[in-house]
Amino acid sequence: MSRAELAETILARMGIAGVGDGVRDEDGWRPGSGPALTSTCPTSGHELARVGAASRDEYDVAVEGARDRFHEWRMRPAPVRGELVRALARELREHKQALGELVSLEMGKIRSEGLGEVQEMIDVCDFAVGLSRQLHGLTIASERPKHRMMEQWHPLGPIGIVTAFNFPVAVWAWNAAIAAVCGDPCVWKPSPRTPLCSIATQHLADRAMAACDAEGVWSLVCGGADPSRWMAEDPRLPLVSFTGSTAAGREVAAAVARRLGRSLLELGGNNAVIVAEDADLDLATRAIVFGAVGTAGQRCTSTRRVFAHARVHDELLERLRRAYATVKIGDPLAEGVLMGPLAAPSAVAAYLAALRAAQAQGGVLVCGGGVIEREGNFVEPAIVRAPPPDRFPIAREETFAPILYVFRVESVEEAIAAQNAVAHGLSSAIFTDSVRHAERFLSPGGSDCGIANVNLGTSGAEIGGAFGGEKDTGGGRESGSDAWKAYMRRQTATVNWGGELPLAQGVEFL
Ligand code: NAD
């Protein structure tokens, strides 16, 4: 069976036939008359399908539809809005296997990670359903007699969601589930590399919307960079949630800021693990291999740098080398495979260029470094023994590939400083049995990242916590905790239930 036939079979299991239409608005599916997108299987290099992208006019229709829907949707009680998300979770549970396999086929992550991505969607839906009864504000003591002051959270408006190729469905769910209970319809612009995943997800969303009389709450505009640029400049969208590279996020954020809109940015990462002299090396090795090799190094939270104390450096390096030798590389849908392909030939070129730069800057290749001779974009995961960080600028860049730079350090203090000396600030970890090292790492002078872990790796976050990072990662927070506040507007309301009109700060007038 060809890969294109496999895609059709998986979609058929979800009850979806025909995926050429790249636009779904309040009135239904449209072919999309913008430039066609080609979905290419990273495992075989063959075409999976062609999808019509949205033209500017079609984009406008989708945004207008979301705007119209907003007027009704914001007035539905939040727990009733939660019913829509509950219905989506039902669809996702029913089709978890098929959607997870489609993610694996089109994006290239292994089956277990594809299923994990769909589970993440289910988890965030469950979270959002609970949240629909907890969108609460504060009541604040007023200084004026017979006055009550309170904070209310109201729906913000239709929002634009732009997503990256490496989490082709989960990132939409992080945004769409929470935004929906907050009262905001969403227009989704997925990655042009993964249109099938987004179309399949939208079909499940359609069924949930039909069950809840909620057509138009979630709509889809496939396309390349253009629709996300339109979103960035579009005053009808008070919030644009953008996930992708720092370079693209910078452009989007600047355009949104020019119109004084809000952006929620989830950009690149350059994540590090510190291995202290007293670390449990079994734990550290397993966590580093998952962090660096999982998803072929194509997670925003992938482990890219290790700072190992001189006392454990050589042993850790040897353990990592041995573990890397056992990683089975191949078809991500096949049993036992732990690493699939890179997204595209350009990613293979970036991998090779980074390794050339690393060696030119004094790095020593410990293992990997080659392109695997077969169809698709397969490379070997690489470990590089790195010179001191100030002489190794390549390690300050995010290369979206399985390359791990291992540095030798003399202390946890030195490791924390080196870890923080990069532009990104997403995820970080320390392996130690010392409460002092752990607390130093978590203190205000410790890790400067949005995520800081002790004795677990940098990737694989749960949805209950707020997800995101600082500096060039963009500062956004999505998913759990109080990330919902980004999707709402805060209103301070004061009610005077007395017969006087006392002014604040004791001001006298009239
Ligand atoms: P990308 O920046 O190439 O594309 C992301 C999205 O932005 C796509 O939908 C794309 O069409 C659009 N886009 C691209 N260029 C644009 C531009 N100039 N203006 C407006 N829109 C543009 O990123 P990618 O290769 O799909 O994904 C990998 C990147 O995403 C990595 O840097 C990774 O770290 C990051 N990422 C971050 C998170 C996070 O939560 N922090 C999660 C996943 C991925």
Image (tube, rainbow, N blue to C red):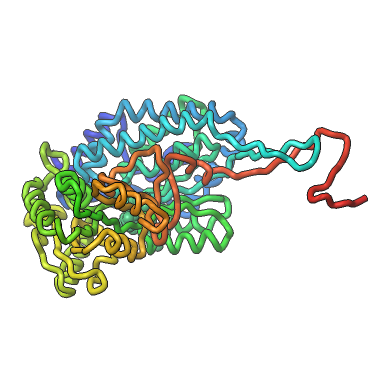
Q: Is residue 478 visible?
A: yes
Residue 79: x and y in percent read: 53, 27
Q: Compared to 399, does 215 lie above or below?
A: above
Q: Is residue 194 visible?
A: no
Seen at 13% across and 54% down, the residue is 316
Q: Quadrant of residue 424?
A: bottom left
Residue 40: x and y in percent read: 23, 50
Relative placement, left or right, of 112 versus 173 is: left
Give the mark count.
0
Which of the two residues, 217 or 283, is positioned nearer the viewer here?
283
Which of the two residues, 170 or 393, is positioned nearer the viewer here?
393
Seen at 79% across and 41% down, the residue is 144
**Quick one: quadrant of the N terminus?**
top left
Relative placement, left or right, of 172 versus 376 is: right
Q: Quadrant of residue 455?
A: top left
Residue 164: x and y in percent read: 34, 51
User: Ligand 1 lies in which image quarter?
Assistant: bottom left
Seen at 38% across and 61% down, the residue is 246
Q: Compared to 172, does 45 lie above or below?
A: below
Relative placement, left or right, of 428 versus 342 is: right
Relative placement, left or right, of 390 versus 484 is: left
Residue 380: x and y in percent read: 11, 56
Which of the two residues, 16 or 350, is positioned nearer the viewer here?
350
Q: Compared to 107, does 92 lie above or below?
A: above
Seen at 33% across and 57% down, the residue is 269
Which of the two residues, 145 or 93, is positioned nearer the viewer here?
145
